Image: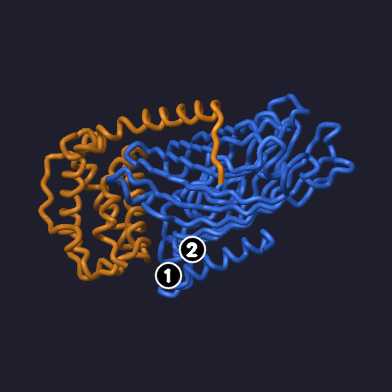
Chain colours: A blue, B orange
Amino acid sequence: MNKQWQGVLLAGIGMFMALPALAQSELVPDMGKLTATAGVIQIEGASGGGLVPWATITGYGSRDSYGANLHYSYVGTQDYALGSYGVAVGIADRVELSVAKQRFSGSLAPLNNLRIEQDIYGAKVKLAGDLVYDQDSWMPQIAAGVMFKHNDGVGGLGAVTNVKGLDAASDSGIDYYLAATKLLLSQSLLLNLTLRATKANQMGLLGFGGDLNDHYQAMLEASAAYLLNRKLAIGAEYRMNPHNLSTDYGKDYYDAFIAWFPTKNLSLTLAYVSLGQITVYDPKRQDGVYLSAQVGF
Amino acid sequence: MTMSTTPSNLAALACVGTLLAALAMPLQAQQAQPTTDSSLFQDFGGLDVLRKVVDDTLALALADVRIKDTFKDVDMKRLARLITEQFCELTGGPCKYSGDPMKEVHQGLGLSNRQFNALVEDLQQAMDQSRVPSRTQNRLLALLAPMQRSIVSK
């Protein structure tokens, strides 16, 4: 079965599972969660930080309701740019479904015409714990998620039109992750650990698997944030990447961010990101700015 | 599915683990005995500030369309006194909560998470009005948050 349709099917199952909860409530979204407790939309379209998916469910719908968010994110480094936009829906503060499109481009010759696009369909289910209410125990909020990724091809590289031409084993792949997010209100701290099984090269922009490796590897991702007040958080993230290609080192990602939640309908995130070297052909470490805007309920 | 981790990844993992453990340390010490440490009560500014915060919270709640109806037939003066006692005791102040257990008083009200959180937001606004620092606000909220399990029944 085509990966895109797997995503749609999974989305359908998720909605079906959440129907009983919806039926009991009014259809008007209740905006019942506390400001910032749904995180922001990360670069692959799921609720989380900037780079890392968390155990949070997007939107401000409580367990009796639902929420949704649109996002646009932009990463600009010396030689590359990555745009991402999409929509994510949170149902009953339990299930999250997301769709995102990533558009990667180069600006340094000979890659100044490089264009790579990727579609990501995500689903996440909260399994245990509550981010806000479990302040008297060590129990984090835990969620399991999946991302169906399909690379739409390469442009501006002459004869190479598919990531398989760059030694990737496949142009589509599935990431599986388990995230644990703990809000330590008494410290105004939020900590997150995510374990991801993946074959994705540069999140999938350079395909999945490769000449060095074509098996799943466990990657650790971590985030820590300090809540300056209930509308402003600062933090940092770390994300491991696999090294599957001889043409790309798969360096780890880092970011340091500030996120602002002026209302429950809008959030803005600004970050400094370090993506490491991208491909062995460009020796420069790619550092730059990350900007993300999110609107929703 | 085969899982493998490179040595540099392992090193990073260990670093993150150490960082998380270090961050968690002060919490363990603090959460063990929240009521015997009076520093939160003092950081709030004592009983006068707590009383004003509670009064302001309830005034905001009575004007809050999300929850005002839940206070129908409630003796607001008595409620303010009881909540002040409770906050004072929770923060380590020289008071004793004289009301009934949380579960008992909220039984049958059918309160939702949205309504619980609405009162939290009113409390946050009231604490802002009294210029309670965010960090201090969150320390009180950390003590109140687990009450959701006794209060919310919807």
Q: Are marks 2 and 1 on the same chain?
A: yes
Location of residue A201 (image quadrant):
top right
Residue A240 at x, y = what percent?
A: 57, 35
Residue A183 position, x and y percent, is 38, 43
User: Above or below — where is A250 with respect to A158?
Assistant: above
Please report the residue visible at 19 percent of the width from the left and 37 percent of the height from the top: B33
> Of A43 and A68, which appears nearest the observer?
A43
- Give the residue drawn at x 32%, y 30%: B25
**Residue found 59% across the figure and 57% down from its top:** A98
Question: If you read the primary sequence from the N terminus, does the residue marked by circle 2 or circle 1 appear first?
Answer: 1
- Residue type at numbered disc 1: Ala
* Residue A192 percent across, percent down from the top left: 45, 41
Q: Which residue is mark 2?
A: A91
Q: Say which of B23 and A154 sits in front.
A: A154
- Image spot of residue A234 (x, y percent): 49, 36
**A286 in relation to A28, above or below:** above
On screen, residue B47 above or below A286: below
Residue behind mark 1: A21
User: At x 50% / y 29%, what residue is drawn?
Assistant: B10
Mark 1 secondary-structure assignment: helix
Question: Which quarter of the rendered picture does the N terminus of chain A lie within?
Answer: bottom right
